[in-house]
Image: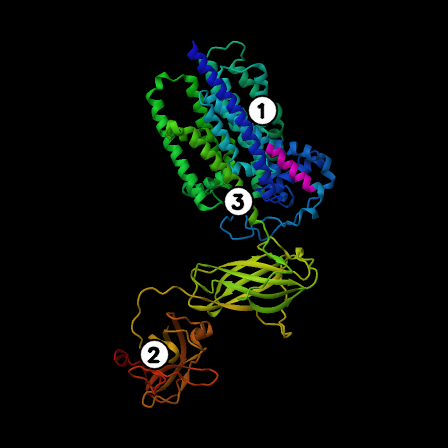
Amino acid sequence: MRVHLAEEQRATHRIAGSRRWFLAVVLFFLFAAGVYDWATPFFEKPDESEHFYFALHLAREQRLPVQSAASKSTPWKQEASQPPLYHWLASLVLWPLRDEIPYDALAENPHAAIGQPLAPDNKNAFLHPPTTELPAAFVWGVHLARWLSVVMGVLTVWATWRMARLLLPTMPETALFIAAWLAALPQFLFISSAVSNDATVTALATLCLWMLLRAIRFQGLAWGETLLLGVLAGALALAKLNGLFFLVVAAPVLLLLEWRGKPAPHRVRPLVVLVAIGVGVLIIAGWWYWRNWTLYGDPTGVSAMLEIVGRYSKPRSFSFMLWAFSGLRFSFWGVFGWFNILAPRWWYTLLDVLTLAALVGLGVQAWRVWLRRHSIAWRTALMWGVVLVWPLLILAGVFNWARITPGAQGRLLFPALAPLMLLLGVGLRTITPARWRVRLAWLACSAWALSALWLPLGVIRPAYTPPPHGEQIALPDEMVRLNWRTGAMTLLGYTISPRVLEPGAMARVVLYWQADTPLHEAYSVSTKLYGYRDEFLGQHDSYPGGGTYPTTFWQVGEIVTDPHWIPVSETADTPVLAALWVNVYRYETREPLPWLTPEGRQPSLPAVGRVVIKRPAFGEHTAPLATFDDGIALLAHEVALDGAQAAVRLTWLAQQPPSAGYTVFVHLVPADTLTSPITQADAPPRDGFMPTWAWQAGDLVPDEHMLPLPNDVPPGVYAIIVGLYHPETGRRLAVTPRDAVFGDAIPVARLMFDGTTWRLDDDAQER
């Protein structure tokens, strides 16, 4: 008897202790949600602006808008096609402020990299002036609507804890660990502090699942619980379309309970519970589905939504969906902003390892259950069956949606968040040695909580922080000075790194601006690279500061640091001294502003500088055919006839950096004298797109010259000779090959002319 009493007392203390710790979990969640709210600027969460303005419309007009393709131009866009429960609740919060909140409080960033997590900048979908410059009603309204979602997040954490306690009655520590892990899930914190219906549908789905599991466990519910479940199920169907999946799970489960189980004392029969759910859905949500049917011929309203957001021309294949799973996996744990801010890659790798470990643990647990399957109560099996089936239903819905329109995001799995966290917790518990479980669980939760707080401070907030600006900004010594003026702004200069680029690399160009007078327009800045024969190599367009500091924010006299990242084409014809172009233009008209140099000249092209682009050299090259002064060697040559021209292809090798920019001469001369050029094709290497002064030791430079072949010369034998000279002095570089011509040129081909046709002297070529 004493032993049993001691065990009961220990169990009571464990449960009471877990309740106190659960309160700490809730307090942490509230604090962390506040950090995510502060770290993320207004409307920088998926579809947040559309959800907010839909709620504001309801607060002002007290009626739902009719959706069509024209709704693309409304502030709420496609979100007014969604079930409106969250938006009605948010409209109540916004009601006192409804007339003071403008629809255009924030301007959009036209260069926003929405859905592009690898883009280096333009993470912001909107332009964010200091909060003090925004209408106070707007600031309060967004925060209040966000904290409505935070309240829903608290309900989710609580219902998850209660669900875990119900399924794991002898493991209160594990139930607490599951709730704590959920409360510190970064993506859950991010979405639970957003103006969005995701937190609401997640909370309602978790509450409904918990009550359904209670109905299984206790063979029905009390009358009050039955009525509450009916209300919750109706609210769930009015929160988001995937809330209807609850009917798919609840109906067969409750019918099975009615068929197999005996009515429990003081409990409502499962069939009555099912009727209550159906009535709740019809009363609370039925009107909305009927409205859609009468307006759009579609009770779900999905057809109207797809007219606005667009759809794929044909459903995506299964292989495409497997590829999209990586984005779904990452964004379940944490992809922020408008699906464009990633955590460090190692963070996802650790979570992948953790997930695989949990799957192994679940496999072990499944094997153990199979071995003792005959001793497991059928109600217990049914409860865990619900836990397994519900995430599969939600996942199937997400995959079906992602097959017809872009939208494979982890937050869409959140209605199944509680079961997923349960499975994760059980799997990890199974593979953890019993004596280390509690310590490792708290260690893991502590590390998880710290990472949840670090991400908004170290990853999210910096993505929206403008680059340095102010009157005291020190200009770097390596800056190329320009002082070009355009409009009311001056481009003081630029830096570019690295100084030598490779195809496929990213060029970082930093422009340094100064505002001469107040700027009342938001100008876009375009940086481009052009290569060999003006080949387009890459471009970056943005408002200054990567979209975070547009010209309308500039103060007169301050220096603005403006970084740009230009992706260099992988197929660039190299090596080349590429030209860097900078244009300032109005986004609406694409009209560039004219430049004015310090000398008062208006340049014909906006080329402000140059940068070398080349591929790395691999392996060893052959011995040079000729070596010229100043470290230039001719490595190979080839001549091909092309109609009335000879294509002379040369390959140069820089044995050291040349000291000047030389011109290559290619002359057609009589073979007997090798003097008095008949025609010539003189040009810097690569038509000036890779001058010798830009060469570095080891550079291989292909160089083609088209030499005209005249028809008005006597028949005979002619030669093509090549060399280099200084364009200002005309001095040729000396050469030391075995067959040099007068010490400053070498022959590369002999040609025969019979009076009508030119041909190569093949015997001479072989010699």
Could you tell me residue 617's position as x and y percent?
36, 65
Could you tell me residue 572's position as x and y percent?
44, 63
Q: In what element is the residue under mark 1?
A: helix
The span from disc 2 to disc 3 (Cα, nearest Å) is 56 Å
Q: In which quarter of the image is residue 633?
A: bottom left
Q: Which residue is drawn at 42% across and 32% down?
A: 440
Question: Front-most of 651 and 237?
Answer: 651
Eye-nearest disc, 1 or 2: 2
Q: Which of marks 2 and 3 is nearer the N terminus?
A: 3
- Name the quarter where the C terminus is drawn: bottom left
Residues at discs 1 and 2 in contact (Cβ within 8 Å): no
Decide whether residue 144 is among the magenta residues: yes
Residues packed near mark 1 inside 10 Å, few (<14), some (14 to 19) or many (20 plus): many
The residue labelled by disc 1 is: 232
The residue labelled by disc 2 is: 627
Q: In what element is the residue under mark 2?
A: strand
The residue labelled by disc 3 is: 339
- Name the quarter where the N terminus is drawn: top left
Residues packed near mark 2 inside 10 Å, few (<14), some (14 to 19) or many (20 plus): many
Q: Which residue is drawn at 58% across and 24% down?
A: 232
Task: Give the amino acid type for the residue marked by disc 3 in the picture.
Answer: Phe
Decide whether residue 625 is among the magenta residues: no
Q: Quadrant of residue 203?
A: top right
Q: What stretch is highlighted in magenta?
A: 138-150
Q: Residue at x 69, y 42 (%)?
A: 138
Residues at discs 3 and 1 in contact (Cβ within 8 Å): no
Could you tell me residue 707's position as x and y percent?
40, 79
Vertical order, 115 against 504 (above or below)? above
Question: Front-most of 25 and 160?
Answer: 25
The span from disc 1 to disc 2 (Cα, nearest Å) is 86 Å
